[in-house]
Image (cartoon, helix red, strand yellow):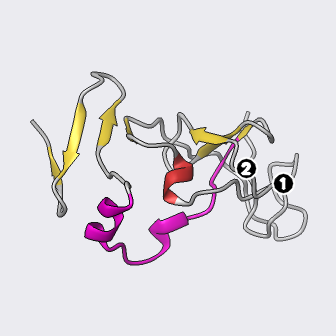
Amino acid sequence: MLRMKECNCGLTHNENVCPDCKQLHVDKRIKRTEIYCQNPNVYGIECNKCNGVNIDWSEYEKHIWCYDCEEDVPGTDGIFSGPIMIGVAEIIGICFDRINLESGERIKFNGVDYERN
C-alpha cells in the first residue's frame, strides 16, 4: 500500500492519485541519520500547515514533526531559504553543528564544511 503525502497542488488526498492534478502520491521519505544540534525554531523553521512553532526534527530527512498537527511535514525553509552569513549567525547563537543519531557524536561545522572523523 502506498503512503500518501501532501500534493504539489497544496492539498492532501486519501487517493493514490490526486483527483485535482492527477499526480501519483508516493511517500519517498528517507530516515534521518543526523540532526542539527538546535531546535528547528532556532533556524526560523515553522510548520507549513499551521504556521506553528511547536515542532521538532522529524525522523525523516527534510521534514519536521509538528506537535499541533501530529504529523511529519516538510516545514518552511527558515534561514535556509537564502544565503546565510555564518559569522552573524554565530554572533546571535545559531550553531550549525550536527548530531549523528546512531553514535550520538557531535559533528562540528567549521564555517565551510563538517569535520567528520
The secondary element bearing badge 2 is classed as loop
At label 2, the amino acid type is: Lys
Q: Which residue does the numbered mark 1 point to in the structure image? A: 12
Question: Tags 1 and 2 in contact by the CB under 8 Å rule?
Answer: yes
Rendered location of residue 6, percent (x, y): 75, 55
Q: Is residue 81 above or below residue 46?
A: below
Q: Is residue 104 magenta?
A: no
The outermost residue toward the front is 91
Quadrant assignment, res 36? top left
At label 1, the amino acid type is: Thr
User: Distance of mark 1 from mark 2, alpha carbons?
Assistant: 6 Å
Q: Which residue does the numbered mark 2 point to in the structure image? A: 5
Q: Is residue 88 magenta?
A: yes
Rendered location of residue 47, percent (x, y): 70, 53
Quadrant assignment, res 20? bottom right
Q: Is residue 85 above or below residue 104?
A: below
**Range shown magenta:** 72-92
- From the viewer's perspective, is 35 left or right of 104? right
Q: Residue 40 or 76: which is nearer the viewer?
A: 40
Rendered location of residue 2, percent (x, y): 71, 39
The outermost residue toward the bottom is 83
- From the viewer's perspective, is 24 left or right of 28? right
